[in-house]
Image (cartoon, rainbow, N blue to C red):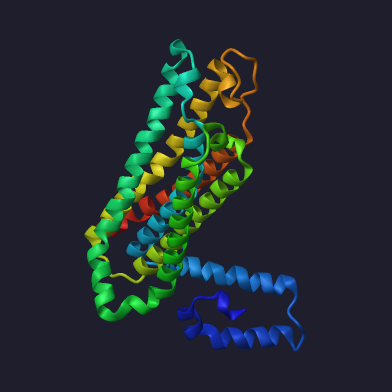
Amino acid sequence: MLRWYPASWRDRYGAELDAMIEDSLEGEQPTVHFRWSIMRAGLSERLRGAGLIGDTAPPSGRIRGGAFTVLCGWLLFVIPGIVFAKLSEHWEAVTPRSSQHLPAISFNLVQVLAGLCVVAVLLGMTSVLPAFVRFVKDGGWPAIRRQVGWAAVATVAMVAVSVTIVIWAHHLPAHLRNGGSAPYKLLGVAWMLLFAATLFTWSTAAIAATRRLTLGTRQLKVAGSLAIAVALSMPIMTAAAAIWWGSIAAAAPWFFSGAPTGSPSSPWVASLLGALIVMTLASVVGVAGLLRVTGSWRSLRTV
């Protein structure tokens, strides 16, 4: 149970907590409620130590934690974003030209903001690259070797499946590539899961490394500014995607079922609804990180 707490906390208070647990239990087995209370307190200490909650961490730690929160929200946002991009392919071809103005604006807004978010994440990585190089030179590699190893395995697996899909697609007729082949669809699902695993493992490695870096005030300001931009973009993209769905549902509902133009069709698509729900949740996470960054911004400026 003590391992719910961070190692640094255990080094200082572990013996006291161990004694308190023994006194509280009086030789009895811990109940589920007791275990839950220890787990909850330990996770709170981990979040507090990472600068994600509370005010005990310095402003630099709180901004770093807020930026990490935004990054996690963005990673959660990417997968439903890809689902939305896939489901919205070629919508112009079956939508009356007179009704394309609103969906075009919302669809293009999603694309532009998604591209800007990718650029922001890459700029954030670039800004901490010198500190990362110093970290590796100073012997920090063993601390992140396991995380990087898992990320490399996930990447190799994703590349292998990607090559398989490309080769297989060249030998399939169009109707089988577009949902007519169950094995091909399953392989596509496997690729999506591997893509998510690759994002998760590399992000875990990046966060593990960045937590150990010594960043200057200027680097923290850059990371905080980029995190604010990404956090603001996510709810805007979510709203734009919902507007696109509503406008296409009104102008060309047959698009969602693949029915002939003008056919009566239902605009409800479970996968699209699920994507919007996850995008909304990811936006909430991003806004939480945004509030963390902005709440500590003034304190950092006085440092």
Q: Is residue 229 above or below residue 219?
A: above
* Farthest-out residue, front: 171
Q: Position of residue 104 (x, y in %)?
A: 41, 23
Give the residue at x 57% y 74%. Answer: 4
Q: Position of residue 232 (x, y in %)?
A: 39, 41
Q: On the picture, is 38 further left or further right than 153?
A: right
Q: Position of residue 27 (x, y in %)?
A: 75, 89
Q: Position of residue 127 (x, y in %)?
A: 25, 58
Q: On the picture, is 149 further left or further right than 18?
A: left
How many callouts does the rendering have? 0
User: Foreground residue, 89 or 78?
Assistant: 89
Among the 4 quarters of the image, the one containing residue 98: top left
Give the residue at x 23% y 72%. Answer: 134
Give the residue at x 53% y 34%. Answer: 173
Q: Quadrant of the C terminus?
A: bottom left
Give the residue at x 72% y 70%. Answer: 33
* Farthest-out residue, right: 28
Q: Is residue 32 above or below residue 172?
A: below
Is residue 52 at all visible to an observer of this figure?
A: no
Q: On the picture, is 8 further left or further right than 185?
A: left
Q: Is residue 93 above or below residue 8?
A: above
Is residue 260 at all visible to an observer of this figure?
A: yes
